[in-house]
Amino acid sequence: MRVVIAEDLALLRDGLVRLLSAHDFEVVAAVEDGPSALKALIGHRPDVAVVDVRLPPTFTNEGLVAAIEARRQLPGLPILVLSQYVEPLYARELLSDGVGGVGYLLKDRVMDVGQFVDAVCQVAGGGTVMDPEVIAQLLVQRARDEPLTRLTNRERGVLALIAEGRSNAAVAAGLFVSEKAVSKHIANIFMKLDLPPSDDDNRRVMAVLAYLNARTTHQEK
Amino acid sequence: MIDRSVRTDTRGSARVSGWISRVPDAVANSGWPRAARWRITNFGLVLGLAVTIVWSVIGAGYFWPGWVWLGLVVPFAFLRTVRRALRTQGLRPLAVHAAVSLELGATGIFIWLMGGLRYFWPIWLILGLVVTFSTHAWVVPLFSSDRERTLEERVDVLTRTRREALDVQEAEMRRVERDLHDGAQAQLVSLGMNLGMADDLLDTDPVEARRHLIEARTGAAAALADLRSLVRGIYPPVLADRGLDGAIQALVLAVPLLVEASIDLPDARLSPPVESATYFAVAEALTNVVKHSNAKSAWIQVHYGDGTLSAVVGDDGNGGADRNRGTGLQGIERRLAAFDGTLKISSPPGGPTAISMEVPCELLSPKISPS
């Protein structure tokens, strides 16, 4: 699988290159700033990309901006965004195109090599991987939100695991229920969130987005 | 006594007025070069002596050269005394007034002498000069004491807010030190120990070595989580990334309440210390809403206008918020006061509560837009 890496700290960049090369990824580009990240993403059209949120020249959210822009030009381009911290706000922005093939993880997750490589593969396959920390930050507040109030506690738990990018089988294992029960919960979630019938992957993304999208934040300019 | 450095302006209304005070020292000290001055003095002396000799040669009589002397001496003396008066530090207008009065009085007496020592009319001139000067001298301290009072109040406020700002900073540094010491540092030590033990056991007991490696990894994850929460408390990354606008939106997402946020900020970035103070103030106010108010929903309004950043955090909870209960609101107030900001609390029993903050703030160059 061809992969592009954008990370400004040489130590971590080399580490990622080594880690992914060792797992049969072909690193076609490893860049260190926002503009070259965008260029590499568009130019190489990799099967998957791993992009750090904070990159030069502004050292703010350059990487996130590059990822969103690349996916605007090439919809569905699989990108896994890494960061020292996670912001639900950024997760929402990454998912807002509703296409999938997106991941947003803490850099800490790299330490669990197996899980990290799994996450990269899932994103490459069009899945959605959200860091458990994003979900945790959101879990506290869900109680009063529409339309999530319509979900039962069990359904909310299932949704949280879907948001982390787990498969039906993994959700079932995590909640100690049968896969069939999980499928039923997921069907209920889709129905209660008024998600139009489409392919299952896309509806999963939409469900996660609904999960992230609770707040009414409007801006007057 | 007003120190001249006051003129370099403070935020208060204290500003020394009057054009005389504003004459720069350079002008007061400048003038013709010494050589030129000598030449003019010598020319004056020669001219005066010449007419006096002419007067004595043609047979004396009425001492008319006195008028020539008067014409020569008055401008010279006038320039000299006024220049000297301009060089005084402080109370400069009074010094110039005194110099001019003395000059006029002396001229009057001279003219009286020339007029033949009749009725001493210059007394009226002198009286007039004395009265105006006294009035001036009486009025100046009145004004300056007013200015001084404004300045004193301003200095008091600055002294207090500076001390408080430093106290807050000191407390923050201590907290950071303690958190690092008890958190990340300790975790790294234990991580190092686990790695060392794994290294020792690798050949003899791989299973136990592996257990230590797993523990090391868990420790590293815990250290990272600790550092992350510490960093958030020092300066939230999203505030650096997105400015106040994005940071408050992120805050709203993280609160277990329905929060309506209306944010109206210019494209230009606000001064970062003010942004950060306002962010933490809004965050603290929101935390209070969650902890104490029993509110069902809250709202935030942030807007910028007329050089002032204002933020209001309101909720439909129980009300009864009081700056004297707990340290949260006082902390906000102190933090804002360092920027001449103010905090107003409206929270009748039964609610609703509105915490309003205002901070004077200048705009920086347009921000590098993220989207």
Image (spheres, rainbow, N blue to C red):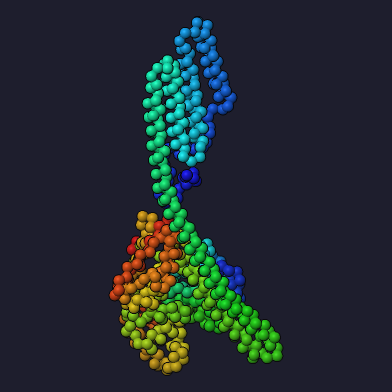
> Is A61 displayed left or right of B38 in the figure?
left
Q: Residue at x 41, y 78 (%)?
A: A138
Q: Is residue A62 visible from the viewing direction of this image?
A: no
The quarter of the picture where residue B218 lies is: bottom right
Residue B254, horizontal then vertical, whole percent: 41, 75
Residue B81, horizontal then vertical, whole percent: 50, 29
Q: Residue at x 40, y 21 (%)?
A: B120
Q: Quadrant of the C terminus of chain B?
A: bottom left
Residue A150, horizontal then vertical, whole percent: 32, 84
Q: Is residue B69 above or below residue B222?
A: above
Count of marks overlaid on the render: 0
Q: Residue at x 52, y 8 (%)?
A: B56
Which of these two is toward me, B105 or B100?
Answer: B105
Residue A107, horizontal then vertical, whole percent: 53, 75
> Is B176 displayed left or right of A134 in the figure?
right
Q: Residue at x 48, y 41 (%)?
A: B90
> Is B126 displayed left or right of B198 in the figure?
left
The quarter of the picture where residue A172 lies is: bottom left
Q: Is residue B93 visible from the viewing direction of this image?
A: yes
Q: Is residue A205 above or below residue B123?
A: below
